[in-house]
Structure formats: C-alpha cells, structure tokens
Image (cartoon, helix red, strand yellow):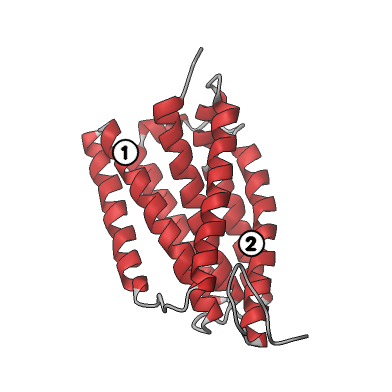
Amino acid sequence: MSDNMQVLGREGSLAPAQHKVLRNTYMMLGLTMIPTVIGALIGMGINFSIIAQHPFMAFGAFMLITIGMQMAITANRNNSMGIVLLFAYTFLLGIIMGPLLQHAANLSNGAQLVGLAAGSTGLIFLTMAAIGASTKKDFSYMGKFLSIGVMVAFIAIIANMFLQLPAFSIAISSIFVLISSGFIMYQVNQIVRGGETNYVMATLTLFISIYNIFTSLLSILMSFGGSND
C-alpha cells in the first residue's frame, strides 16, 4: 500500500499508521450507526413521561450513564471490550434520543425535519472533517477551549431547567452545534497529525459530536419549523 494517501481533501503523504487509524475510525463510526438506529426505534416506543415529571433526576441519570460509559470505554480502549462498550453506549444514546424523535413523529412535517437535520449533520461532518484533514494548521490548541465550551453549555442546560426559556434552549442547541463541529475538525486533525492513535477513542469523540449536532439541529428545526397541521 502506498504511503501517499489523499484523505478528505488532504494533499501530501499520510503515514501508514495514521491512515490505518483514520480508516478504522470511519469504519467503526459507520458501524455505530446501526445500534444507534435500533436504540432510537426502541426509544420511540417507550413512555418517557417520567422525564417531564423529574427533569433533574433524568438529567442526572443521563450524566451518570454518559460519564460512566465513557470512562469504561476509555479504560478498555486497547481491547475488544472497548468496542463492545462503544456499541452499547451508542445503543443507549439511541434510546435516549427517543423523546426527541417522538416529538418529531407527532408533527405533520416531522419526517422532513428529521431528514433535513440528518442531511445537514452529514454535510457538517464532511465539511469539518475535510478542513481538519486538509489544512496544514495544527488545531491541537483547540482541545481545551472546546472542553471548556462543553462544560459551559452543560451549565447553561442546568440553568435553563429553572428558567424554562425557549429562546435560551435554542441558543444552547446552537452552541452545541458549533462546539461539536469544532470537535470533528479537531479530532480528525489529531488523527492525521498522529496526536490520536486509538480509533476507539477517535470514534467515540466523532460519534458524540455527530449525535449532538443531529439532536441539536432537530431541536432547532422543530422550534422554528414544526407544524401540527
């Protein structure tokens, strides 16, 4: 296999080790969509009314699941259990997406909004991945800023549980789209520059970014374009 590879617009050579990580990451990322879709279909059939009654408990449970699963995946990133846990995590996130998809299903144009959110998510991913892979600039400095942005966004979510401001919810969703887009560019850039050598961890970061972009875009679209006619 030639060492000269062109990946998503990147010109020049890509070392075999970096190409392998990138190839395995994209392959694994595609496979994670299978348990996600299965989980989402199951989640749409579950009654999540308890979430509306106890939003703080639901958010706390979500954070525990998220942090716990991410820690478990990180601890097993170098063995096959890491892959199993990654698939389990994506399945759970698919289920957790249930209430949002239930809401969309109740709208007369819900299917169109879901399709638009999915298409826009794919376009954002391809664009940001191309930028991360093709530019000669090192985006490693963005890691800390993006992490801080995520923490601020979660604090805003907690604050809005008290405020219940629709405009604030849209702003938070918009922030998640921007931060997650940055994470895609950052992660792909790390791979092609050799900063990330584990495809399980790379897949985890990219999956979470795609998940956040899709759910955030769908929330925004339903806020502005949802129709019950």
- Indicate the position of residue 45 as horizontal and vertical percent values: 62, 31
Q: Residue at x 63, y 87 (%)?
A: 15
The image quarter containing residue 28 is: bottom right
Mark 2 element type: helix
Q: Residue at x 57, y 43 (%)?
A: 118
- Indicate the position of residue 200 as horizontal and vertical percent values: 60, 72
Q: Seen in the image, is 78 located left or right of residue 173?
A: right
Q: Nearer the viewer, residue 68 or 27?
A: 27
Note whether residue 81 is visible. Answer: no
- Indicate the position of residue 30 as horizontal and vertical percent values: 67, 58
What is the quadrant of the N terminus in the image?
A: bottom right
Looking at numbered disc 1 in the image, what kind of residue is underneath it?
Ser
Q: Residue at x 50, y 28 (%)?
A: 103
Which residue corresponds to mark 1? 169
Q: Is residue 98 above or below residue 28?
A: above
Label 2 – label 1 distance at C-alpha: 28 Å
Residue 225 tag number: none
Looking at numbered disc 2 in the image, what kind of residue is underneath it?
Leu
Q: Residue at x 41, y 36 (%)?
A: 220
Label 1 crowd (10 A; few <14 / some 14-19 / many >=20): many
Q: Is residue 53 above or below residue 10?
A: above
Which residue corresponds to mark 2? 29
Label 2–label 1 contact, CB within 8 A: no
Q: Nearer the viewer, residue 152 or 26?
A: 26
The image quarter containing residue 86 is: bottom right
Mark 1 element type: helix
Does label 2 or label 1 sit earlier along the sequence? 2
